[in-house]
Image (spheres, helix red, strand yellow):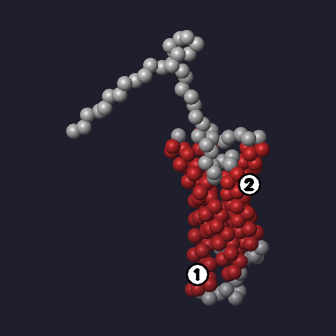
């Protein structure tokens, strides 16, 4: 069984001739790249926005996407994701321009919840569309009368936008857990 070691404690330094303890120095933690208000966070938001807009545009360019519920769900999900990403990108641009930190717990909580919800919705929609495109192309062999290539590319862009959301969600969640 080990015993705790006792070390002598030095008296606090004198301040202005008094023996008051100096206030502890606060050390501000460096902003981790990828967090809100950083240049990498802005790059992630712009990537999310770009891939969701591409997915939305490709899916909307087909005439028969409303006939399948999963495709309508994808359009709604990437539409929501694009609005969320654009809003947060504008906030990041503002924070970078005025050199303001977004390390406020309320802001990080809002980012984390929003990223979690939108990434889950986007992932579910992309998975649903992937299943439908596999059904149409491989099982039914009806790609000649459908827009399989467009559906596949829109689904791929939705997956890529989900991959771009994941790092920002996990960094925000880690920041909340560590504070």
Expressed as whole percent of the image width and height from the top left, the position of residue 108 reads 61, 44
Residue located beneath label 1 in the image:
135
> For the view shown, which residue lies furthest in the left direction?
1
Residue of label 2: 86
**Residue 4 or 158: which is nearer the viewer?**
4
Hey, which residue is sitting farthest top in the picture?
A: 17
- Which of disc 1 and disc 2 is earlier in sequence? 2
Question: Is residue 144 in view from this perspective?
Answer: yes
At 51% from the left and 19% from the top, the residue drawn is: 13
Rendering coords of residue 175 (x, y %): 55, 45
Identity of the residue drawn at 68% across and 81% down: 148
Residue count near mark 1 (Cα–Cα under 10 Å), binned few <14, some 14–19, many ≥20 = few
How far apart marks 2 and 1 lie (CA) works out to: 33 Å
Q: Residue shown at 72%/72% (left/top)?
A: 59
**Which image quadrant is residue 122 in?**
bottom right
Vertical position of residue 131 compared to residue 114: above or below: below
Picture quadrant where residue 152 is located: bottom right
Most foreground residue, 71 or 167: 167
Could you say whether the residue bearing mark 2 is in a helix, strand or loop? helix
């Amino acid at each position: 069984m080990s015993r705790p070691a006792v070390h002598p404690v030095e008296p606090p330094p004198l301040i202005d001739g008094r023996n008051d303890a100096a206030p502890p120095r606060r050390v501000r933690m460096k902003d981790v790249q990828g967090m809100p208000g950083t240049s990498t966070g802005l790059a992630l938001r712009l990537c999310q926005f770009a891939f969701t807009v591409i997915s939305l545009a490709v899916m909307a360019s087909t005439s028969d996407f409303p006939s399948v519920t999963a495709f309508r769900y994808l359009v709604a999900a990437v539409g929501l994701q694009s609005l969320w990403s654009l809003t947060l990108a504008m906030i990041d641009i503002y924070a970078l321009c005025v050199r303001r930190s977004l390390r406020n717990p309320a802001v990080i909580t809002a980012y984390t919840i929003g990223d979690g919800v939108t990434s889950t919705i986007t992932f579910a929609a992309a998975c649903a569309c992937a299943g439908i495109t596999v059904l149409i192309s491989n099982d039914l062999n009806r790609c000649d009368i459908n827009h399989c290539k467009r559906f596949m590319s829109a689904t791929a862009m939705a997956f890529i936008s989900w991959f771009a959301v994941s790092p920002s969600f996990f960094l925000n969640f880690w920041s909340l857990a560590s504070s």
